Amino acid sequence: CLFQLDRQITETFRGRLWSVPARVHAQPLELYAGRRLDADQLARELDRLGYRRLPRPAGPGTFGRTGATLDVVLRPFRFPEGARPELPLRVHFEDDHVVRLEGPAGDPLDVVRLEPALIGSIFPSHGEDRLIVEPEDVPPLLAEALKVVEDRNFDTHHGFDPKAIARAFWVNLRAGGIEQGGSTLTQQLVKSYYLDNRRTLGRKVRELAMAVILDARFPKAQLLGAYVNEVYVGQDGDRAVHGFGLGSQFFFGKPLDACSPAELALLVAVIRGPSWYDPFRHPERARARRDLVLDQMLAFGLLDPPTHEAAVASELGVLRGQRRAGRYYPAFMDLVREQLDRDYDRERLASAGFRIFTTLDPVAQDTAEAAVTGELARLEAARGLPEDELEAAVVVTAPRTGDVLAVVGGRRPGFRGFNRALRAQRPVGSLLKPVVYLTALEDGRHLAELVDDTEIAVEDPRGDDWVPTNFDGVAHGPVPLFRALADSYNLATVRLGLELGVDRVAGRLGALLDVPAPEPWPSLLLGAHELSPLEVARLYGVFADGGFATPLKAIVAVEDAEGDRVDRYPLRTRQVAEAAPVTAVDHALRRVMSHGTGRGSRFAGAAVAGKTGTSDGYRDAWFAGFDGRHLAVVWVGRDDNAGTGLTGSAGALPVWDALFAGLGVVPLTLPVPEGHRLVELDYETGLRADPACGDPVPLPLPSAVSPRRKPGCGFRLRDLGDRLREWIDS
């Protein structure tokens, strides 16, 4: 029996010890002259990577700051394109931009990348993400504190400690309760690896036998390293937080090697009872336990008196905001796992030591998270809604490459729960209207063409009458196509869609998304169709990239343990719509922002394009918008599907605004399609106009189309030239 037990646990532990899980990295931060980034932001990014702040840098992984200049010694790192040695670097800033990079001898540098942050590891049996701490990266103070507090004879016992058991028995007997445990670190490791939580004599005997076997078969350093990565330290919703690597991120938002003595003491403190000593729910209890650990560290010479005094005087330092998980991004990791599951065997991922380089942009991710948490709280306060009632999801992409830069699955970004960005299928409302207008333009119509925005009743396939109305309850009569889209008129859109054929619009939507066409119900024309925010990002990527559909991806490359490329994810794109009609729709989407439903945006006067969406009963508020660099989709609503009273412009657009305020807007440059020319059209009527007699907006029209001038605008010589050119062209 002992022989079988020996073989079982030895093989299991050795396999788990030698199986190196895939390590998942974010996108590295690139520095170059002209980049929109200030010194504070770079310092925060270096803090995230575990760099130490010093008066002046002293070796790899350190940095210092003097005013608007930051000196750093970058650690060596092996990128997919090749290895970079350690690099002394000086970064000069002016206002919110990088202005100059200098190398070791003051020589100018064009582009420098920080090493990418580790955002997770993939395990086979757990299916969970962890941040593995290599033995050489375990802070010596943490290792020694663990031994002092949990297992003083760890280096000399043989898996269990009779003296500790006797001491714990006596202390608990005197206290009349459980005050001290007698389990060694090895026994605690056995419990975590192999046993359940039943408290029986047989289980205890088995635990002791397994601890002795592990101690006999493996070096103490390996056992301690396994404990550091396995120990349970807390609960984040339905996610169990295991290991000090993820624990330091969960509590303090920083790498383990960047933790102070007081923070390391708190990590050691909570393992005695992660629920009982939870510093978020029981801060006084946790602090008392932490101070007891600090006292033990002083008594055994791990701390000197001044350091001990400062540590005891310090606050707990845990992050009390909505996000507690530091560099852990569960919503984005869901997308990574989906892509990996299509391409790799999970067991191989968990054992081959792969390095996975992803598209996650930590700056964009943090900006998106801050936009969600800040704006939802502001919306609830402004509208008298109950606290934490609203939920949200955000997807940020680079449409030309398909890179997914950020994913927010809910208002608690570090909480691994329901991922609304990927999983929530919600009615998208007016977000589908650009598909109707794209179909019309592909049919030979143009932006100045008039469509009736008048009452209509439609018999649906079930024989029921469907009577749509406009949001403002008013029928506006004949309106130009671009205004019908910008002001999101329902009646005009329904009439246009019926003229085209609902089945044709449904087929166009399916083709753009590369999915089967939805059922051609008339209500589809007004967005009675459910999509996830990620699917909406795919759809709007076509508009943001001139008619090309680029598959969204979360992974750039996969390397094996030797650094050889296992797989790369090259740019794949296909044209799903002609450039001219797509560009014309984009011009109309710019009018959404300057004149239409998005005019309340702080970027209404900027060169950005977007569309609001609101589902029936104000259950879903949407906004999808893009500039010259980023596309972002925002959804705001409630999980119980109840109404929020928020339209897309009132609920989702403020989140988008806050996001792009942090990212910085790159003006959208829209070309004039071939065979078209820009014409100044009056926004209300679609007739030619100028500032003296109307509200003109520049829009592309086919060269053969020449709208009449708005009455009262008079005659201009340029009009005669246009007429002559049209006559010659004909």
Image (cartoon, rainbow, N blue to C red):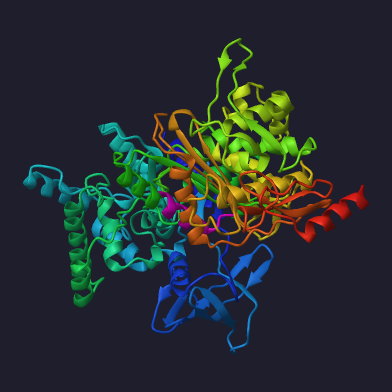
Q: Range of the magenta residues?
A: 359-372
Instruction: Answer whether residue 611 is visible to the viewer in this image.
Output: yes
Which residue occupies 57% across, 59% down? 606
Q: Quadrant of residue 492?
A: top right
In the image: residue 189, left or right of residue 596: left
Which residue occupies 36% across, 37% down? 195
Return the residue found at the far top: 463
Q: Position of residue 201 (x, y in %)?
A: 25, 33
Q: How many marks?
A: 0
The residue lying toward the viewer, choosing from 327 and 7, is: 327
Placement of 717 over or under 20, stated as above or below? below
Q: Position of residue 496 (x, y in %)?
A: 68, 30
Return the residue found at the far bottom: 105
Q: Position of residue 299 (x, y in %)?
A: 18, 68
Placement of 61 over or under 283, stated as above or below? below
Placement of 73 over or under 371, stated as above or below? below
The residue lying toward the viewer, choosing from 552 and 103, is: 552
Identify the image quadrant of the N terminus. top left
Q: Position of residue 544 (x, y in %)?
A: 67, 50
The residue lying toward the viewer, choosing from 92 and 151, is: 92
Inspect the magenta stretch and tell me whether residue 369 lies in it. Answer: yes
Inspect the magenta stretch and tell me whether residue 452 lies in it. Answer: no
Magenta stretch: dominant SS? Answer: helix
Instruction: Answer whether residue 118 is visible to the viewer in this image.
Output: no
